[in-house]
Image: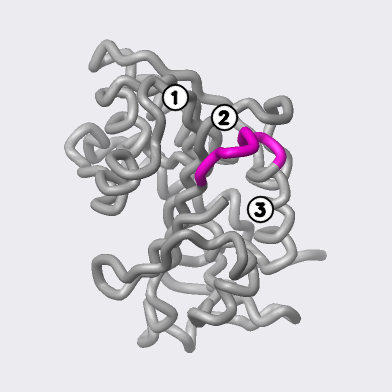
Amino acid sequence: MNTMPDARTYWESHFASAANACAASRQHAACLEQFHERYLQKDGTILDLACGLGRNARYLAQNGYDVYGVDFARAAITACTRLFQKQFLKGTFIQATVDAIPFCNNHFDAVICIAALDHVTADYARDALCEIRRVITRDGMILLTFDHPETDEDKLDQTHALPDGTLLFIRGKYQGMLFRRYQDEEIKALVGAEHICSFDYGKEGSRVVVCR
């Protein structure tokens, strides 16, 4: 019998709890402003992959973009839909996984994926990037962020290392959550250094990657 914690269960619970704490008050990721100003086409079609509670999708919708959101947690999709309805914003939200994006080729002008690819295994992240590149246009832009590799350093005794090195929290507050502690060079290898337009450092040491 499999007794390992389940990531979907963790995120469903996390988003349901966070949604009840008023998702509308949350601020969008700071890096999104520069990405919007420097790289996005006016009135473009944007996908927020692993959209969570919709804080970043809301910012994009408020700035005139045609916004879509995908998340594998039903609680996240429900929260996003309610947020957009409450604030009279236009957006489409679908429950799906990041490695099987339910849109046709060349559908989006840009894809953002904020603090998500380091919460899946390495193989899953590679598959997700292939999917992202499938659904964006030839000149489409991608915004990715990765948490600081030493995030939750004090909680390593609550984790179990999977064969690929990804950490699975097996007890404590984050039980069921995955976290891969990417170093800078590992991110560049994952994304492909030749595809990177900028690699910067954001709040609390997060890595902010703009690529194609």
Q: Position of residue 212 (x, y in %)?
A: 57, 51
Disc ID at residue 129: 3
Per the image, the residue denoted by label 1 is 44
Q: Residue at x 47, y 86 (%)?
A: 156
Q: Is residue 154 above or below residue 45?
A: below
Disc ID at residue 108: 2
Q: Position of residue 99 (x, y in %)?
A: 70, 47
Check the image and name the residue furthest to the right.
1
How far apart in space, not on screen, are marks 3 and 1 (Cα)? 20 Å
Mark 1 is on which residue type? Gly
Q: Looking at the image, is mark 3 or mark 2 nearer the viewer?
A: 2
Numbered disc 2: secondary structure: strand
The crowd level at tag 2 (other Cα within 10 Å; few <14, some 14-19, many 20+) is: many
Reply yes or no: does residue 93 show up in magenta.
Answer: no
**Who comes first in sequence, dot 3 or dot 2?**
2
For the residues labelled 3 and 1, say whether their Cβ atoms are less than 8 Å apart.
no
The crowd level at tag 1 (other Cα within 10 Å; few <14, some 14-19, many 20+) is: some
Give the magenta range: 134-141
